[in-house]
Image (cartoon, rainbow, N blue to C red):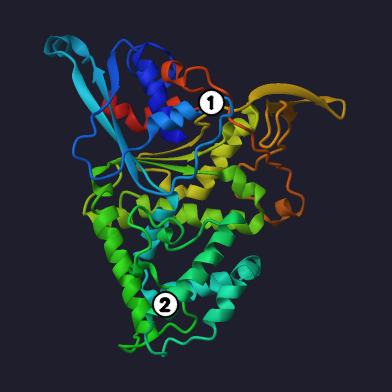
Amino acid sequence: MFLVSLLANLLAMGRRLDTLPALSRRLGGGERLVAVSLAPDGLSTVPRFAFEAKRDALADREPAWPDRTTALSRIAVTLVLARSGVFGRLVGPRQLTVELLDYPGEWLLDLPMLAEDYASWSRATWALLAEPARAEASARFRSWASSVRASDRASDGVARQGFELYRSALAALREQGFRWLQPGRALNPGPRGEAPVLHFFPLADAPDRPVPGTLGALLADRHAAYLKDMQATEFRGKLDRFDRQIVLVDVLDALHSGEAAFDDTARAIGAIANALRRDGLLARLLGRAQPKRLAFAATKADHVPAAARPALASLLADLVGASARQERLSVHAIAALRATEEVTIRWGGAEIQAVAGVPIGETARRSFDPGTIPPRRPGADYWNAPPFRFQGFRPPLLDRPESFGVPHLGLDTLLDDVLGDALA
């Protein structure tokens, strides 16, 4: 939904509609923006992002949220900008082409894996799966994996069976709100499909130096080959051309999913933030500071009242970590498509701020008080009686989004932080 809103609103802004006020102010009240258009696809080897189909689906009689991103895609938009200053006006306008890459957020969890070998990754992952909060979802895999040994003879069939059971455990954990799910391509293999290099899983007795010809050696080799392939095809092959990164985080769902899932999300976000720092794993991998601009955005900000949104952004900033808040990093609370309105309701004799929309699975609009959001990572007392309640809402039926853009919250401020220097 994020790219759909970004593109629809940029194109509408090019038609002199004030859909992105912060960007408009950056461009002299919009006067410096001459035109906006989708750039030709050219010779790209990456599938095109299905912008038009996703946008037009929002104008259907029964609009639905776009599906989860499961594969890599790209699209580019060209902005024609009048130059500032007397000399700039003499030179004439310039073109800025913004190339956008959409990919599953799970893939970013492969970055922390680059710092571990198979044995250390196995031990850490096995310990996580055995924790009480994850034990039930991973029970079948752990029961089976306990019957095999690293010293067993190498077998493609055993490796494939173990991977399939491990993947099922990861899928069950994702449904429960867990996000530390490695490797990233286990659940979203991408357009190349499920290659044998993916067929590895954690072993409880993974040795530091496996004996050649054993199952432990086969799994370690595939773990190493997988990371090498990701470095070559994704991190070096694609991300090295991009100098700005936006990471979308469903903080509200993490709060709703409970303490264990929230802590798991916090771990994932902290690891990704550290990997994306200007001196982090990605920078060391690419041999240069990366990225130039980095933003983390808490999504679904329209699901809570305006007064709660600063706490939502503050909570995400706390998860990102104070050490990563410098270095051209920004944190936001946004809604790519606004599905609710602000309302005031009476509760217990007092007036409180709430939101109103059509809940998912229903047809009538109603008001909802989500409670309070902690501005920092909550302690154990918070989870005894969490004061936050989550309600999902259906997307609104839009009138000609191809012409008028998409209603949003905070998207303009986010884009101004990420692109502002390029628009000067």
Name the side, left or right, on which 130 lies relative to 73: right
Q: Which residue is mark 2?
A: 159
Q: Amino acid at mark 1?
A: Asp
Point out residue 53 in the picture as x, y percentages from the top left corner. 42, 31
Name the side, left or right, on which 407 lies relative to 217: right
Point out residue 162 in the picture as x, y percentages from the top left corner. 47, 75
What distance separates the C-alpha of mark 2 from that of mark 1? Answer: 45 Å
Seen in the picture, residue 269 relative to 166 is either above or below; the reply is: above
Q: Residue at x 61, y 73 (%)?
A: 139
Q: Which mark is residue 60?
A: 1
Name the side, left or right, on which 61 lies relative to 389: left
Q: Residues within 10 Å of mark 2 (few under 14, many from 20)?
A: many
Q: Residue at x 59, y 61 (%)?
A: 172
Element class at badge 2: helix
Q: Residue furthest right?
A: 349
Residue 364 picture quarter: top right
Between disc 2 and disc 1, the foreground one is: 1
Quadrant holding the C terminus: top left
Q: Residue at x 28, y 16 (%)?
A: 35
Q: Which mark is residue 413?
A: none
Point out residue 4 in the picture as x, y percentages from the top left corner. 43, 31
Earlier-in-chain disc, 2 versus 1 = 1
- The answer to which of 315 and 7 lies nearer the viewer is 7
Give the total of numbered labels.
Answer: 2
Element class at badge 1: loop
Q: Is residue 289 visible?
A: no
Name the side, left or right, on which 191 lies relative to 312: left
Q: Amino acid at mark 2?
A: Ala
Q: Residue at x 48, y 23 (%)?
A: 406
Point out residue 396 in the picture as x, y percentages from the top left corner. 59, 25
